[in-house]
Amino acid sequence: MARSRVATLTVLLTGALLAPPLMAVPAVPASIDAPAALAAFGRSIAIAGDFAFIGEPGGRGEGGKVWVYQRQGPSWRMVTSIEAPEGAEQGFGIAVASDGTFLMVGQAQASFGGRPGGPTPPPAPAGAVHLYRRGSNGQWSPAGRLAGAAAGDQFGGTVTLAGDRAYVGAPGAGTVAVYQRGTAGWTAAGSITAEGLGERDAFGAAIAVDGNRVAVGAPGHGGDGAVYLFTRAADGSHSADGVALTSRRASDNARFGATLLLNGDRLMVGAPGTSFAAVRAEAPAAPPAGGAQRRFGPPPGVGMVVSFARAASGAWTEQGVIAPFDFPTSASFGTALAMSGGELWIGAPSADANAGRIYRATIGSNGEVTGMSQLTVDAPHGRGSQLAAAFAVAGDHAVIGMPGDVQGLGTVVFLGRAANGSWASRGTAFPPVVDRFAGVTGKETMCDASGKAADFQCGNTSLLSFLPISAVGGQRGSQMSDNWGWTDPATKREYALAGRNDGTAFVDITDPSNPRYLGNLPLTPGATPAAWRDIKVYKNHAYIVADNAGAHGMQVFDLTRLRNVKAPETFTFDALYTNINSAHNIVINEETGYAYSVGSSGGGETCGGGLHMIDIREPKNPKFAGCAADGITGRRGTGYSHDAQCVTYRGPDEKYKGREICIGSNETAISIADVTNKATPIQISTASYPFVSYAHQGWLTDDHRYFYLDDEGDEIAAQSDTTGQNMAAKGTRTMVYDLADLDDPVLVKEYIGPVRSSDHNLYVKGNKIFMSNYGSGLRIVDISDPVNPREVGYLDTFPDDENQPQMVGAWSTYPYFPSGTIIVTSVTEGLFMIRDRSQPIP
């Protein structure tokens, strides 16, 4: 690794910034109330000799792990992992500290505020610190536990080792607990707190120790943050060393004190939330040539590091400010700090759309910063990786965390310093990929007497097969999304087209109990993985879009290429439609040969997020045909459509028979439009319904008389309804509209399902609806009586949802294969092949 650029310090105020020598101090992780994406592998890091300890606190509801790596020559090898003890709550690994013999693992969980207007959630459980000792065999064995005192104290959110003393932060309670190591182990040795602390001050979110002096950060104090200094007396007590330190340059929400480095009479304080509103005094009197106003100083949200020095009188004074030289926006500069020789390393994980950067401030012999550069990390770290949210540096070795990498799973990069002083990668690491459930193939698995097929609860269905994500092209971080199907008109073979956040899988399911994965179509080069991928088919071609994926466009893939695949392939698309960038969904009317991109965004012709109409009658040569948007719908009033169905109308309303009609699910209402003439689309009607939360998707009955609509958010929103009138609190709610008169849609029924889950996508085939209802999986509903739906079968693809409305599990279903095979994609599970074994209701 080489320096990418060298420049003078952006802002340097009075006095020397750092007085050498300054010993290396391990970086303190970002505060515990950081975004959830930081609660992943690489969220906390420590180095002790030849060992590196990497925390993986896990997502909400998971216990967490600590992974132990050992250096062997220039490389690092994973030697063991330490699981969260049985009964431990989420957050194990939020902080780690070790001296090579003892390991201390913090386990703390932030208290989340809940939904606006919703009930206040209970405080998180009390935290803990778990102790481990390395034996002669190299194994780490439990050696005790230090417990927090009260719920929500976040005890263990920070842990610092200083010889035979340990300091444990409890920022939720505003204290730091002190422990002393003796022959009997670790014993309590008092606590540190400060006067005048508020409930949200987060005193203890960062701790730095040098000898008998202790610095404690309170990044929430006063809205911008503060740092408190203490001195340890001979009896072990700690007394305040002057008044709390603040910075006159810290803005609101600066989080001043989120990270600390302390050595002797020098203190470095990170304030990663700082916004710089004022320009520098040395701005020129006149703007540069051309009239453009030159801007001096970093933009808002860039962050800073502040230097303090202790005078002979004992008073601490602010000496200078460091900010990045290249003015990135929202860099969170100062989130992590460490010293490497004569360099101060500063983490800026929010820079470059959360890809992250590391800055190196060079310290001169007189303590001033003489220059700054970026550390070029020769390892992939794209948007969202959050490089340098945490790191540790010790001698010629460094471990850099990227806890946001791969949709929050996290990655670390090992660095080594060569004799010439340059840093280079020694490899990357991440935990092994483990499927949630084992695959099920070979034969049909019937729903047994206990109501299960393999690992999945069921009723009146059978499991033909199940392929976990790894078996359909998924890699680390892959998740399933939408799906569709294709039946080859020439061979009659059936294929599942299964979307993932990072590509599209093609699976031959002609023998549904022995499906064969054929290959993957990756996302468009330059696009980024995103949760939403949607697929439809027209004349043997698949049309694929992705939402929030950057410049993805609409991929066109000739499905006849699947006929001769012998072994899994990596495919390329046959055409790319670039008049859109990202899109939430693609809708196709196979009778007319028109496609409709909805929820288009990120560039190109977005049509306000409404219907972006595309002529695909020449399948590999899509052409823009116009826009249609109902401006009184959508949360932004632009006619945004989240999903739609477009048909050649054959319903009972004689006025519109033979016309091309689109029914949009437009967030706040359904919207019906006549798009027969693409140049002059006509808005027919709009209809909303009680307690609308998010009108998500719907489908017509085969006779075009009734329309069934799912609302993705009403079940969750209903939990905070104190009136008891929102029927979605009782079970999954589906709206039934009578469209006998397209000019006047009538809500005739709110169907309430037997379980409480959020609904996502539904499709109608004959007298049944096939619903993918997130945590409760596939639900099969008989609509022989269209206004009185009745559930007749199900297979739960996410068996551990505890009947709570949440956005996990079954994303979508496709029930239209001639064989009767039903496919379901489940977000973190994989691809299911299911058979409906319910009997029709007379």
Image: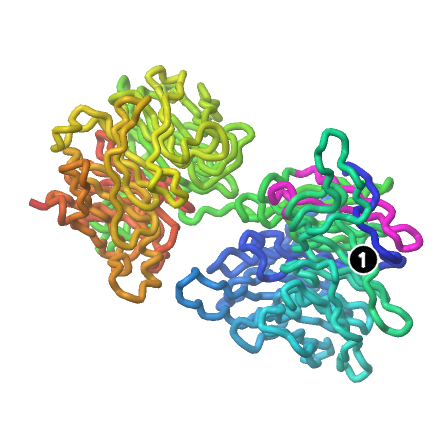
**Image coordinates for residue 720, horizontal then vertical, percent:** 35, 63
> Which quarter of the rendered picture does the C terminus lie within?
top left
The residue sitting at 51% across, 43% down in the picture is 477
The residue sitting at 72% across, 56% down in the picture is 47
The residue sitting at 28% across, 38% down in the picture is 671
**Image coordinates for residue 179, horizontal then vertical, percent:** 70, 76
Q: Quadrant of residue 48?
A: bottom right
Q: Quadrant of residue 307?
A: bottom right
> Which quarter of the rendered picture does the N terminus lie within?
top right
Q: Residue furthest right?
A: 365
* 355 in magenta: yes
The residue sitting at 66% across, 49% down in the picture is 300
Residue 775 visible in the picture: no
* 378 in magenta: yes
Three-letter code for the amino acid on which mark 1 is drawn: Ala
Q: Is residue 1 above or below residue 454?
A: above
Q: Residue furthest bottom?
A: 235
Circle 1 crowding by C-alpha within 10 Å: few under 14, some 14–19, many from 20: many
Looking at the image, which is closer to me, 419 or 525? 525
* Colour pattern of the rendering: rainbow
| Label 1 residue SS | loop
As drawn, is 574 to the left or to the right of 264? Answer: left
As drawn, is 304 to the left or to the right of 354? Answer: right
Looking at the image, which is closer to me, 283 or 179? 283
As drawn, is 684 to the left or to the right of 395? Answer: left
Magenta stretch bounds: 350-379
**Image coordinates for residue 208, horizontal then vertical, percent:** 75, 66
Residue 827 visible in the picture: yes
Give the residue pinned by disc 1: 24
Q: Is residue 507 above or below residue 247?
A: above
Looking at the image, which is closer to me, 809 or 535? 535
**Image coordinates for residue 544, horizontal then vertical, percent:** 41, 29
